[in-house]
Image: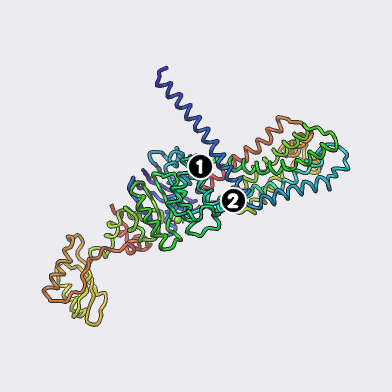
């Protein structure tokens, strides 16, 4: 191998590494901006308070947390698919709609960054925001810890599953947000999409479907649902299939977001 | 620095930009002129890489905008139409963010932000939220964003739109000054800006380039260009017209206005006459006739007239010929 080839090779490696680190830097820059802008507005705090109040209400009043007499957070996690149904689209609806409404998308996409860096950066920021809201429910963990001796592994799995589910809903909201500059429409679309993901595998619905649809179809549709995947996390099981499910929903939705944004630009 | 070849953009079946080609070199300020809906913004959006062209090639500093967009975008500073900015950020936060995306960090970022703030007079609103800014300041903020990395190429879509006359003047001066070292393209539908800031102008109408030249060349396409108007005391319009028509070098003449005791006429020479030939023969005529000449003026041609002539739908094809 000639020295020229070696230097050319290492130069290519270097530029790869540089491209990689600049991608991370761009994503971080965009995520930081998004997150700062969330917390710059009082809506973020209202959202968090609202989220915590709803969690408390469902866990204690509807879920009868104390009457259950068990040291677990089942009464808490069981409501998350439904809570997120409205709360996550409320967070995600603005990601791209706002960008198009303000016209800043034209600035963002003429910067020396790739569209997917912007898409991932925005997604990560909103996901972090939801994770912060979720993390603020920690007093519940302290409460069960005080009252009994819970299995912390199961609780951790519950939180992990919940965060992943929030991420899946959020990616869908980002996608619908790219569809329209109207945030209300974007919100409604993503609620409908997320509702499908719940109902497709929600026992009351599947029980009904089984009456007139073949079993394989019902199960096939149910496989698309978040419910069975989130349930195993609640039971304290981290199954790679469930991880793959949530991550695929996220990856697919973000990929589609990119396609939608590109098709808008192509006119 | 910018080379655009046969650019086409179709929205559905509608051709917003139809076979547009031009080049811009360093040291040039290219004015993009045209009525609303002519395709100015669409062209700029393609050149900056915001929307992909339907056909044609765009090369920016040697990089192809479609196949190699990142290095091409690095060279460009862009001020989109209506000067968008994130309303929930402060001016400082916004400029820092764009500097960071431009790859500036640490001390060089601080310097870049400081420089842009100084150039655009943003000191007084630096920590104010963008949504509380007046239109002028908002505009400057977005402008500051476009020059933050001191780009070689600056592309501005209607940079003076919505500004007051002083601010307009400021922006034009800034464009002219920066144009000495950069390649600048800006669009406008205000004709004075062509004279005030451009070294060259392109007139675009319904997606096609209909004229391309220096402001002076464009002006000479006007019927008025080369005409001479004169105001004479003590003669009636009829006499003035008669004498003018007898003069060999005058192809056509018109009485512009008659005042008590004076008349105002305009004489058109034959196309291709030598410079100043007409003024001289008119002057000699006045001396011969012993007219009291109040004013004798060679017309330069008016841009608005040229603009109207080449962009109105029902003008003859001859006047739409492209200037070379
Ligand atoms: N995204 C789009 N979809 C469909 N038509 C468009 C789009 N953008 C611009 N056009 C059309 O293309 C033409 C040129 O528009 P534009 O480039 O904005 O003109 P200008 O900036 O010269 O006023 C207009 O007729 C406009 O309606
Ligand atoms: Mg425009």
Q: What separation in Å lies between label 1 and label 2 (alpha carbons)?
A: 23 Å
Which residue is at 20% across, 74% downward?
A: B294
Query: Which colouring convention does the figure follow?
Result: rainbow
Name the quarter where the N terminus of chain B is drawn.
Answer: top left
Q: x, y (%) of residue B320?
A: 32, 58
* A16 lies above or below B16: above
Q: Nearer the viewer, residue A219 or A215?
A: A219
Q: Nearer the viewer, residue A62 or A172?
A: A62
Tag 2 subunit:
A
Label 1: element kind:
helix
Residue under pointer 1: B100
Q: Nearer the viewer, residue B269 or B157?
A: B157
Label 2: element kind:
helix
- Left or right of A32 on screen, residue B241: left
Q: Nearer the viewer, residue A36 or B223?
A: A36
CA neighbours of label 2 inside 10 A, class few (<14), some (14 to 19), many (20+): many
Task: State whether residue B19 appears in this view.
Answer: yes
Report the residue that reaches farthest toward the top: A1
* Quarter-of-image position of residue A154: top right
* A249 lies above or below B90: above
Task: State whether residue B23 appears in this view.
Answer: no
- Left or right of B114 on screen, residue A236: right
Tell me the mark number nearer the camera, choosing from 1 and 2: 1
Q: x, y (%) of residue B118?
A: 44, 51
Residue under pointer 2: A97
- Left or right of B131 on screen, residue B293: left
**Marks 1 and 2 on same chain:** no
Label 1, ligand 2: CB separation under 8 Å: no
Q: x, y (%) of residue B230?
A: 21, 72
Q: x, y (%) of residue A247?
A: 66, 35
């Amino acid at each position: 191998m000639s020295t020229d080839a070696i230097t050319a090779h290492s130069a290519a490696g270097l530029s790869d590494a540089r491209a990689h680190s600049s991608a991370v830097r761009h994503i971080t820059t965009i995520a930081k901006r998004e997150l700062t802008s969330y917390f710059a507005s009082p809506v973020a705090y209202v959202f968090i308070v609202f989220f915590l109040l709803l969690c408390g209400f469902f866990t204690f009043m509807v879920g009868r947390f104390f009457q259950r007499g068990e040291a677990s957070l089942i009464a808490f996690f069981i409501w998350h698919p439904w809570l997120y149904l409205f709360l996550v689209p409320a967070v995600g609806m603005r990601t791209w709609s706002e960008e198009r409404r303000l016209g800043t998308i034209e600035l963002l996409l003429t910067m020396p960054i790739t569209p997917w860096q912007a898409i991932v950066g925005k997604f990560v920021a909103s996901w972090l925001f939801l994770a912060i809201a979720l993390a603020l429910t920690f007093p519940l963990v302290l409460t069960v810890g005080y009252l009994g001796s819970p299995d912390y592994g199961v609780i951790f799995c519950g939180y992990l599953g919940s965060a992943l589910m929030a991420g899946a809903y959020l990616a869908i909201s980002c996608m619908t947000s790219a569809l329209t500059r109207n945030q209300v429409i974007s919100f409604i679309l993503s609620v409908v999409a997320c509702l499908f993901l719940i109902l497709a595998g929600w026992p009351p619905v599947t029980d009904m479907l089984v009456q007139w649809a073949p079993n394989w179809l019902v199960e096939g549709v149910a496989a698309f649902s978040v419910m069975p995947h989130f349930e195993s996390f609640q039971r304290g099981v981290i199954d790679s299939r469930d991880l793959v499910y949530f991550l695929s929903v996220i990856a697919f939705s973000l990929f589609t977001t990119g396609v939608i944004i590109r098709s808008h630009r192509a006119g | 620095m910018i080379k655009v070849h046969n650019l086409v953009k179709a929205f559905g079946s509608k051709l917003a930009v139809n076979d547009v080609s031009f080049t811009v070199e360093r040291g040039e300020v290219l004015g993009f002129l045209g009525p609303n809906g002519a395709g100015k913004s669409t062209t700029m959006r393609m050149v900056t890489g915001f929307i992909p062209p339907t056909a044609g090639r765009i090369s920016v500093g040697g990089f192809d905008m479609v196949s190699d967009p990142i290095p091409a975008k690095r060279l460009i500073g862009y001020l989109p139409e209506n000067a968008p900015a994130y309303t929930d950020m402060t001016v400082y936060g916004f400029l820092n963010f764009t500097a960071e995306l431009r790859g500036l960090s640490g001390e060089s970022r601080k310097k870049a932000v400081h420089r842009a703030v100084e150039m655009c007079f943003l000191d007084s609103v630096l920590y104010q939220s963008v949504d509380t800014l007046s239109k002028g300041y908002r505009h400057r903020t977005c402008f500051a964003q476009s020059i933050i990395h001191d780009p070689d190429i600056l592309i501005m879509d209607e940079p003076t739109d919505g500004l007051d006359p002083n601010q307009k003047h400021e922006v034009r001066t800034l464009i002219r000054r920066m144009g000495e070292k950069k390649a600048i393209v800006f669009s406008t539908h205000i004709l004075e800006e062509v004279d005030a800031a451009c070294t060259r102008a392109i007139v675009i109408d319904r997606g096609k380039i209909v004229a391309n030249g220096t402001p002076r060349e464009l002006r000479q396409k006007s019927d008025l260009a080369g005409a001479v108007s004169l105001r004479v005391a003590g003669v009636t319009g009829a006499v003035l017209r008669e004498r003018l028509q007898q003069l060999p070098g005058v192809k056509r003449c018109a009485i512009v206005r008659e005042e008590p005791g004076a008349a105002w006429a305009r004489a058109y020479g034959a196309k291709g006459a030598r410079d100043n030939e007409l003024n001289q023969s008119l002057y000699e005529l006045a001396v011969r006739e012993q007219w009291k000449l109040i004013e004798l003026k060679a017309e330069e041609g008016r841009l608005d007239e040229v603009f109207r002539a080449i962009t109105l739908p029902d003008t003859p094809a001859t006047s739409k010929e492209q200037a070379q």
